[in-house]
Image: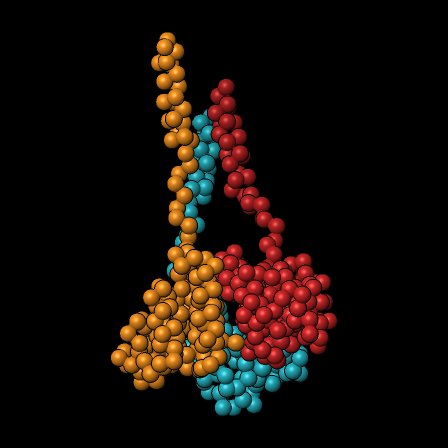
Chain colours: A red, B orange, C cyan
Amino acid sequence: MKKSIPVLIAVMFAAALPALSQEPKAPPPAKHKVVFELNAPAPSGWDQLFHNVENIQKIFGAEGVQVEVVFFGKGLTMLLKKNVEYADRLKEAAEKGVNLAACQNSMRAMNVKTEDLFPFASQVDSGVAELVRKQEAGWSYIKGGE
Amino acid sequence: MKKSIPVLIAVMFAAALPALSQEPKAPPPAKHKVVFELNAPAPSGWDQLFHNVENIQKIFGAEGVQVEVVFFGKGLTMLLKKNVEYADRLKEAAEKGVNLAACQNSMRAMNVKTEDLFPFASQVDSGVAELVRKQEAGWSYIKGGE
Amino acid sequence: MKKSIPVLIAVMFAAALPALSQEPKAPPPAKHKVVFELNAPAPSGWDQLFHNVENIQKIFGAEGVQVEVVFFGKGLTMLLKKNVEYADRLKEAAEKGVNLAACQNSMRAMNVKTEDLFPFASQVDSGVAELVRKQEAGWSYIKGGE
């Protein structure tokens, strides 16, 4: 019994040790999240947009980064079906998981209908509000164009 | 009638239950906060600025979003009294609670005095420092212009 | 002696307690941190960049703010040795602690070698990824140019 106290203390001490040495379990690596604004007429930043997205997917890994591009103002014209010059690159980006989002405010202002957009485009109520929501949700913001 | 007292008590008790189980009052919904940079000469982004602010106030509700526009560099000229073309729209924005802030560094560099500015304009020591402070305080940042 | 072991253990345990209860030392007050993007050909925003950096260092104090400028796309040309017009101002900024970072993706695309850059320039793998990393680390983002 005389040894019971030190044993008890030793047990308590041993029990405390893991708390001292154990790191909290690391959460799974958070995906990087990036929202681009494209708000410029051709050609400002149009080609660069693809370089930027590709670079980010290369650096962070395609699974490691979530990318959305918000098109509004004169940038909306990039998503029009008649913009055949960029059709292949846009489709490729969409297939790689990039969310290409058209601003419905700009669509109304420019009389653009859903059927005028590439079929792989998505839509948001307001491009600017979307940029705000994304930043509030922790996304990094990059304004495209020069 | 014999059951009326316990029934009454049960009713009173039941009435008290919601008060016991009631969640703490939710705080008022956090306002969205957005700071715009206007740093471009006319006409780049000048008209769009108003569309953007109006869209955001429409989407989030006038009470649901706090908006500040920081004018510096060539964008400062938008706040000059002599910019009569934009006077009405600027005044209307100010009346709807948008803080229109002139950069004092740009004012000095361009020899602009307080009396040269629209009376509803406010001032900040440095437009860039203001953008930093606002981002540090959790505001979303949108760079105006194309 | 019989008590020496529990006493020893108790002393060890007591010695461990501060480690359990002690808060990590508070870090020194966080510096303001600002990352600028320079992604535009001359002259858009080139002169203003220096005004902006100087203003921020004046407002926050040279020790109170950490500044990085990321050069990519057509903005990379600002860091080329042959850009003699800006050599002095860039060198001065670097000496004041501003990190002038060239994007290696842009370097490859434009066939720019390390020896083509000013010797005080640093390099990052990707200008856009760098802007994302910095924002994720709590830096404020300012897009240079108008």
Task: Give the quadrant of the N terminus of chain B.
Answer: top left
Q: In which quarter of the image is residue C74?
A: bottom right
What x and y, as percent, mark residue A67?
Answer: 62, 62
Task: Please name whichever residue, B62 or C74, is drawn nearer the observer in this view of the structure.
Answer: B62
B108 in relation to A90, above or below = below
Q: In this view, does A84 lie above or below B35?
A: below
Residue drawn 61% across the image and 69% down it: A112
Q: Above or below — where is B84 with respect to B4?
A: below
Q: Can residue A127 be seen in this view?
A: no
| Residue A64 visible here | yes
Number of callouts: 0
Of residues B25 and C49, which is closer to you in this image? B25
Q: Is residue C113 left or right of residue B99?
A: right
Looking at the image, which residue is at 50% across and 19% down? A1
Residue B46: image x %, image y %? 45, 76
B137 or B28: which is nearer to us?
B28
Q: Residue furthest left?
A: B115
Residue under the image location 48 percent in, 21 percent down = A2
Between residue A146 and residue B69, name the one nearer to us: B69
Is A69 on the left or on the right of B135, as rendered?
right
**Residue B6 percent location from the top left of the image:** 38, 14
Q: Residue B92 location, x and y as percent?
A: 36, 69
Residue at 46%, 37% (x, y): give it: C12
The furthest residue to the top: B2
